[in-house]
Image (tube, grey):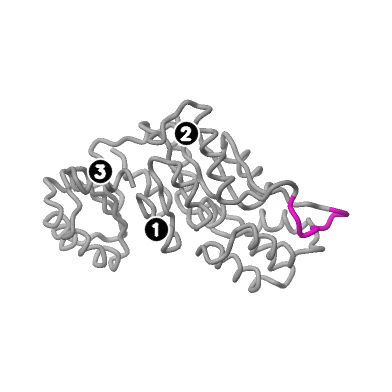
Amino acid sequence: MVLLDFCVMNAGDLILQGEALSADLLGKARATTGAQRILPCPPQAARLTGATRGAAFDALIPAIEAERADWAFMPAGARLSDYRLIAFDMDSTLITIECIDELADFAGKKSEVAAVTEAAMRGDMDYPESLRRRLALLVGLDIRVLAQVYAERLRLSPGARELLTAAQAAGLRTVLLSGGFTYFTERLRIELGFDFATSNELEIAGGKMTGRVVGEIVDAEVKAGQLRRLRQEQGLRREQVIAVGDGANDLRMMAEAGLSVAYHAKPATRAKADVALNFCGLDGLLRLFV
């Protein structure tokens, strides 16, 4: 990926963030990267300038993660305002829940639906097929439970509001691209001021869910296509786009961005992202920039 490849060959900045970064860990990080200086970045972060990633640093990664710390290499001087658009997945990324799993709880089928959700996010199952299977378990569910899930269970991920506020202040367009449902994405779009949102529209008949969606399923390719279209419409280069996701269904969308961020993600997603935030909140992304 662009940013990590950059830092394998060139000196940039290594950002470490965690609840308690030990002096020993910081010393080892500096020694293994040849960093020039260690600059504190409150709260709970440090920036090592003039750092180069290589085999010695990679050997240190298990120790970093054992301290529940996140790490990322960035080009020196990178600023949030260098980017012009940021795209988010919704379920388990912008928000803490999988909405379809919570809907299934009201139908007494949460465990069955959650198992399919997990398989889809790992990439073990085709997303459209996984969605059809899960929706089939919700046939006849009263649509009033949508409001209950939104009011009682939907919560923003830690740092989500702070990241969005900072991105909007820096002039970035904000986009929500979800394989979830419009009932939730539209309310979040309005509440949080997103510039654009897309997701699946549940088919409703007689106040009940039919187990189908209206129109095409918003899957990995649709999400990627929407981001590509928005980028092209605004005349942006790939390097001016950030994409944040957590599952296999986000990988194609993330590949359309110059900076891909895996947030509390599945291993396969983390492995292909430029940056992985495994422990901190979404506002951890802000500490990557000067």
Q: Which sits earlier in the primary sequence, circle 2 or circle 3?
A: 3
**Viewer-side label of 2, 3:** 3
- Front in this rendered view, residue 97 or 7: 7
Cα separation between marks 1 and 3: 18 Å
Name the residue type under label 2. Gln
- Report the disc number at residue 95: none
Q: Where is 262 relative to 80, above or below?
A: below
Residue at screen point 74% across, 52% down: 213
Name the residue type under label 1. Arg
Instruction: Look at mark 2 in the image and give the residue it sits on.
Output: 168
- Front in this rendered view, residue 68 or 179: 179
The span shown in magenta is 205-213
The answer to whether residue 234 of the structure is visible from this angle is yes
Q: Pointer 1 and pointer 2: residues touching (CB < 8 Å)? A: no
Q: Seen in the image, is 154 located left or right of residue 93?
A: right
Instruction: Look at mark 3 in the image and give the residue it sits on.
Output: 6
Q: Which sits earlier in the primary sequence, circle 1 or circle 3?
A: 3
Instruction: Look at mark 1 in the image and give the residue it sits on.
Output: 270
Cα separation between marks 1 and 2: 26 Å
- Front in this rendered view, residue 219 or 134: 219
- At mark 2, the secondary structure is helix
> Which quadrant would the C terminus be assigned to in this image?
top left
Cα separation between marks 2 and 3: 27 Å
Name the residue type under label 3. Phe
Q: Position of residue 230 (x, y in %)?
A: 53, 33
- At mark 3, the secondary structure is helix
Q: Position of residue 153 (x, y in %)?
A: 62, 59
